[in-house]
Every structure is written in structure tokens, then in C-alpha cells.
Amino acid sequence: MNPSKHPWLSISLVALIAATVWLWQERTQLLAFPDILSAYSAKEYCSCRYVMEHSGEYCQGYVKQYLPLSSLVEDADQRRVVASGLGRSNTAAWVGPRQGCRLIPGDGG
């Protein structure tokens, strides 16, 4: 096959190779991405509700992302929030007025 007769095929092949190399170099960060959505949402919702003391409806709009969560569950008695999305779940809990909310370690999964 003569590359001069099929320039788009050559360009596509080079682009595919470049994308593969980039994906391989960024694999650690890309694998961590699914956890970010639920962790961010749980922490921000908890802070919105228990630190800033906004309504649940307001805080749901505040943490809304382009990628939707599969669930956002608030336990008002315990002041905890569990957010799930992209197959991962994270929990944030209110610690106190000076500390605010924190993610609960080891809860992602």
C-alpha cells in the first residue's frame, strides 16, 4: 500500500499510536478517575449541608456534575453522605464546626 495514495490512513495510524502511548503514560491517573466523582460529590455535599447549612435540594444542585451520580444518600442523624458513581462509592462525614467534613478513609470501592 502506497502511503501517498492513502494519507488519511497514515495520519489515522499515527494518531492511534500517539493516543495509545498517551493512555499508557497516564494509566494511573485514568484508573483513579472513577473514584474522584464520588469522593468529590460526597465531600462537597457534606460541606454544603453541614458546614454551610444549606438545604438538601440546594446542595444536590451544587454538587451536580456532567457525569451523573448513581446515588447520593444522606444520613442526617449521623451527618454522613454516601455518593456513588462510575462503580465507586465514597462516604464523607461531618467532624465538627472547626474541622468541617472529611472523607472516610478506605471507603472507596
Image: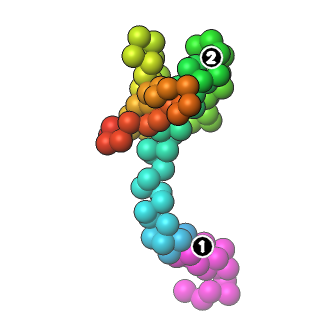
Name the side, left or right, on which 89 lies relative to 94.
Answer: left
Query: Is 67 a magenta residue?
Result: no
Residue type highlighted by circle 2: Glu
Residue 41 badge: none
For the rendered model, the colour scheme is: rainbow
Q: Quadrant of the C terminus?
A: top left
Name the side, left or right, on which 77 lies relative to 26.
Answer: left
Q: Residue 39's x, y, as percent?
A: 47, 38
Query: Which region is colored magenta?
Result: 1-18
Residue 15 badge: 1
Q: Which one is in front, 80 or 87?
A: 80
Quarter of image, res 78: top left
Q: For the stretch drawn in magenta, what is the main secondary structure?
A: helix
- Packing grade of label 2 (10 A; few <14, some 14-19, many >=20) is few
Quarter of image, res 58: top right
**Label 2, label 1: how far apart the Cα atoms are:** 49 Å
Count of labels shown? Answer: 2
Disc 1 element: helix
Closer to the observer: label 2 or label 1? 2
Q: What residue does disc 2 label?
A: 53
Residue visible at 40% across and 31% down in the picture = 91
Residue visible at 43% across and 22% down in the picture = 80
Tags 2 and 1 in contact by the CB under 8 Å rule? Answer: no
Q: Which one is in front, 45 or 66?
A: 45
